[in-house]
């Protein structure tokens, strides 16, 4: 077989395996994935808030609201230096 055919077959097998693996994730793992995505969205929104020129205090307050119940602590499970 030509190498591109083998590569294509390998990519197809990998895609099928990843779909099968995703379908087999247990409920707790799926919930954990959803929490990570929600936290990432909240942090992205905080970054956009800061980019818009709003004060840090305003953006942190927004982050706290969006992350309520998701992460540990008032910084959504993540705190860094400024």
Image: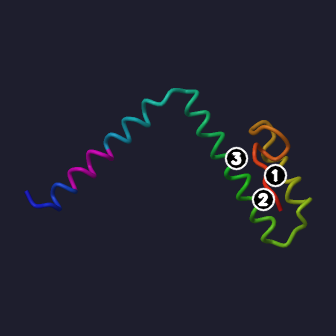
Counting residues from the N terminus, which is met first, the one under dot 2 or under dot 3?
Answer: 3
- Above or below — where is 20 with respect to 82? above
Left/right of residue 5 with respect to residue 64 in the rendered view: left
User: Residue 35: horizontal and vertical position, in percent?
Assistant: 66, 40
Neighbours of disc 3 within 10 Å: few (<14), some (14-19), many (20+): many
Residue linked to disc 2: 46
Magenta residues span 8-15
**Quarter the C terminus occupies:** bottom right
**How far apart in space, not on screen, are marks 3 and 1 (Cα)?**
9 Å
User: Label 3: which residue?
Assistant: 39
Q: Residues within 10 Å of mark 2 (few under 14, many from 20)?
A: many
Q: Main secondary structure of the magenta part?
A: helix
**Mark 3 touches mark 1? (CB < 8 Å):** no
Q: Seen from this angle, which residue lies furthest front? A: 81
Q: Which residue is mark 1?
A: 63
Residues at marks 2 and 1, CA–CA distance in whole angstroms: 6 Å
Q: Position of residue 76 (x, y in %)?
A: 78, 44
Which mark sits nearer the N-terminus, 2 or 1? 2
């Amino acid at each position: 077989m030509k190498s591109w055919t083998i590569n294509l077959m390998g990519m197809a097998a990998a895609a099928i395996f990843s779909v099968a693996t995703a379908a087999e994730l247990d409920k707790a793992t799926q919930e954990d994935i959803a929490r990570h995505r929600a936290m990432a969205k909240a942090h992205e929104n905080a970054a956009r808030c800061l980019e818009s020129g709003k004060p840090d205090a305003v953006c942190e307050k927004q982050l706290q609201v969006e992350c309520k119940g998701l992460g540990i602590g008032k910084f959504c499970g993540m705190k860094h230096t400024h």
